[in-house]
Amino acid sequence: MSKETIALASDHGGFTLKKILKEELEKAGYDPLDLGCHSLESVDYPDYAEAMAQCLAEGRVSRGVLICGSGIGISIAANRHRHVRAALVHDGLTARLSREHNNANVLVLGERTTGVDVARDCLHIFLNTDFEGGRHERRVAKMS
Ligand code: RB5
């Protein structure tokens, strides 16, 4: 069976956590696609949210991970696109609800606000939790 490709992108504020989660994805049997950034040099988070939105629109991946310092800027930028449902999560519960209720297709984390172990936990929960559908289907449909 071929490995699922999961896209990752971050600005400099999320670069270190992106590297860690990329390794975590490899360990878990996924094929990570790194859309940048590629160093700690200062860059602009909207450019990486844009790269993620494009990657999803082209159908290269169906799920992705975005990271910046707080997770706030990059999630605001990503959610300007109707096909993106980017959820800024802070723990296992918000990661689970982002899938069950919101059918989030992008997990967003803040490197400065979320510890590495919690971030790893969020990643696994995000990838392994199904959308509940039902009453949530109508609400999610209203956004796209
Ligand atoms: C970059 O300094 C920082 O502003 C960015 O990573 C993020 O936290 C923005 O919301």
Image (cartoon, rainbow, N blue to C red):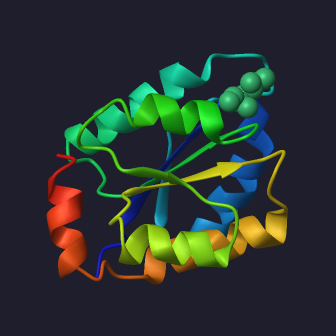
Identify which residue, 14 or 41, lies in the foreground: 14
Residue at the location (14% across, 66% down)? 138
Image position of 78 (left or right of 23)? left
How many discs mark residues in the rendered view? 0
Which corner quadrant of the figure contains ligand 1? top right
Residue 117 in sight from this viewpoint? yes
Image position of 31 (left or right of 45)? left
Name above or below for residue 112 compared with residue 125: above
**Spot occupied by residue 111 in the image (x, y as percentages of width and height):** 78, 47
Identify which residue, 132 or 30, lies in the foreground: 132
Identify which residue, 76 or 29, lies in the foreground: 76
Image position of 46 (left or right of 70)? left
Residue 36 in sight from this viewpoint? no
Residue at the location (50% across, 33% down)? 76
Identify which residue, 80 or 56, lies in the foreground: 80
**Spot occupied by residue 84 in the image (x, y as percentages of width and height):** 32, 44
Residue at the location (38% across, 78% down)? 100
Name above or below for residue 20 compared with residue 70: below
User: If the image is split into quadrants, where does the N terminus sit?
Assistant: bottom left
Name above or below for residue 66 compared with residue 81: below
**Spot occupied by residue 128 in the image (x, y as percentages of width and height):** 45, 82
Residue at the location (25% across, 72% down)? 136
